Image: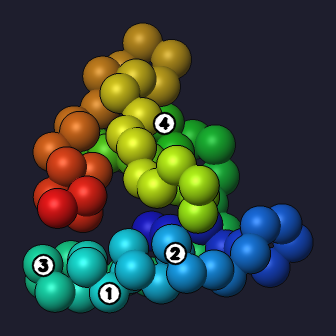
């Protein structure tokens, strides 16, 4: 699930490009508020902005995350 950006962040170009690429790759997008526990349970996560693009989060607490999704979206 994609975190909602209604209280922080912007609905910018990088976000739109990532969503478009995800759709092209057959990855469904759902915008929702998530709890910390849901983030920790995630299989993959990334952060992005217009200056640095997209980069993976490799680890949350003691859990390693899959970085392939981020690589696929970067292509």
The dot on residue 40 is 4
Of the image marks 2 and 1, the number of the one nearer the N terminus: 2
Q: Which residue was labeled with disc 1?
A: 20
Residue at point 38%, 74% (across, down): 18
In this view of the protein, can residue 59 be seen by the observer? yes
Of the image marks 4 and 3, the number of the one nearer the N terminus: 3
Of the image marks 2 and 3, the number of the one nearer the N terminus: 2
Separation of residues labelled 2 and 3 (CA atoms)? 15 Å
Closer to viewer: mark 4 or mark 3: 3
Q: Residue furthest top?
A: 62
Q: Position of residue 41 (x, y in %)?
A: 41, 41
Separation of residues labelled 4 and 2 (CA atoms)? 22 Å
Residue at point 67%, 74% (across, down): 4
- SS state under label 4: helix
The dot on residue 25 is 3
Q: Indicate whether 50 appears above or below 45.
A: below
Name the side, left or right, on which 3 lies relative to 21.
Answer: right
Q: Residue furthest right?
A: 7
Q: Which residue was labeled with disc 2?
A: 15
Badge 4: residue crowd in 10 Å (few <14, some 14–19, many ≥20): some
- SS state under label 1: helix
Separation of residues labelled 2 and 1 (CA atoms)? 9 Å
């Amino acid at each position: 699930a994609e975190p909602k950006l209604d209280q922080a962040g912007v609905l910018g170009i990088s976000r739109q490009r990532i969503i478009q690429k995800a759709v092209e790759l057959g990855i469904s997008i759902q915008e929702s508020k998530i709890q910390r526990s849901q983030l920790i349970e995630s299989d993959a996560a990334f952060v992005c902005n217009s200056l640095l693009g997209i980069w993976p989060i490799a680890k949350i607490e003691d859990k390693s995350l899959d970085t392939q999704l981020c690589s696929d979206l970067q292509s």
